[in-house]
Image: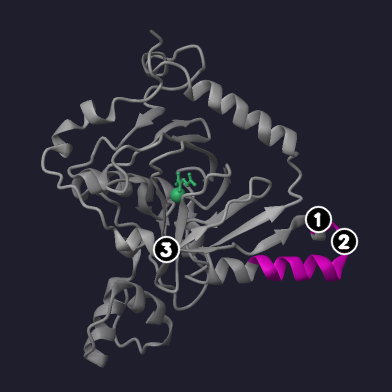
Amino acid sequence: MEESPDPPFEQTYKNLFNNITPQKNFPELSAVEECELPLIDLSRLNLGEIERRACKKQIAMASREWGFFQVINHGISREILEKMRGEQVKLFKKPFHEKMNYKDLNFSAGSYRWGTPSATCLKQLSWSEAFHVSLSDVYPHCPIYPQVFGIMPHTDSDFITVLHQDHIGGLQLVKDGKWFAVKPNPEALIINIGDLFQAWSNNVYKSVEHRVVANPLNERFSTAYFFCPSYDTVIQSGDVPCVYRSFSFGEYRKQVQEDVKIFGHKIGLPRKVKTKMIIVGDLLTGEPRSWAKVVENVGVWPIVGPTA
Ligand SMILES: O=C(O)CCC(=O)C(=O)O
Ligand SMILES: [Fe+2]
């Protein structure tokens, strides 16, 4: 009998399955509306100055309002994208033990992940497997949907992410405090702003929380390219006042990994906020405020003391 390609989620993470109570209703998942991301035609960049400027404006607006957009006429042909998907399917369909022991593909140790090794409860378990080449993800059909996510809610810790997903769907993002399901368009590439770009732009462009919901029937494939600077690159906005302390990408990445180990999720940019400004703001207004609100308002608040 042929060995299954699927990772042994239930065996490896069996302690997480001990106390699950069958729940039928997950209103926060079923109520999610579908949205179409702003669609940007990159061929406009080559059509002369006026078109070029209008296109750039559109990109800037989508990055501010959505943190996500999709691009067409991006220069990668449909055949290449389909070929990439074909190779990806071939790789993930290999028997699990073969994927575990890959030596011939030049993958470094630890480049194959399935599930979430740091998970301490089912909610923290991602029902997906990934090769970090760039990142090639497969979300096997999930027998315990909707008790787990394909990928837990997160923001990307990079500068910008380029994503290609198939027609199955499952990617969701937060807009105006609500979750939306992204309508798939296999011809388009999805671009999203990462934490580093948000910090560099002093919160003008948004690194938006997103997740992938698992699917009880179909498996789903996606490929992500995380555009990152070198570890010693310092991220600092030139704006005054500046929301975040300057930090290197290496330092940020290390902190994210430590937080995931300790808390099961990353803290991310709130760690880099100039904290004294927040305390001053709170004392002045007397209002309890959320992190996000505080971060957004920093620029307009009086500063009565030195900032960290
Ligand atoms: O598979 C997807 O659609 C998104 C994956 C993702 O968000 C990530 O790997 O950071
Ligand atoms: Fe992501």
Q: Quadrant of residue 46?
A: bottom right
Residue 267 percent across, percent down from the top left: 29, 57
Confirm whether the magenta stretch covers residue 78. no
Label 1 beta carbon less than 8 Å to ligand 1: no
Q: Are marks 1 and 2 in contact (CB under 8 Å)?
A: yes
Q: Quadrant of residue 15?
A: top left
In this rendering, is residue 197 above or below 146? below
Q: Which residues are magenta?
A: 45-59
Q: For the residues marked 1 and 3, what is the alpha-carbon distance in whole angstroms? A: 32 Å
Q: For the residues marked 2 and 3, what is the alpha-carbon distance in whole angstroms? A: 38 Å
Residue furthest out toward the front: 24
Q: In this view of the protein, which residue sits in the foreground, 294 or 132?
A: 132
Where residue 43 is drawn, which disc sits there?
1
Q: Which residue is mark 3?
A: 32
- Graded by Cα atoms within 10 Å as few (under 14), some (14 to 19) or many (20 or more), the crowding at tag 2 reads few
Amino acid at pointer 1: Ser
Label 2 beta carbon less than 8 Å to ligand 1: no
Q: For the residues marked 1 and 2, what is the alpha-carbon distance in whole angstroms? A: 7 Å
Q: Secondary structure at mark 1?
A: helix
Q: Which residue is mark 2?
A: 47
Predominant SS of the magenta segment: helix
Where residue 18 is drawn, which disc sits there?
none
Amino acid at pointer 3: Val
Q: Secondary structure at mark 3?
A: loop
Q: Which quarter of the rendered picture does the C terminus lie within? A: bottom left
- Tell me: 135 left or right of 284: right
Amino acid at pointer 2: Leu
Point 46% across, 36% down: residue: 219
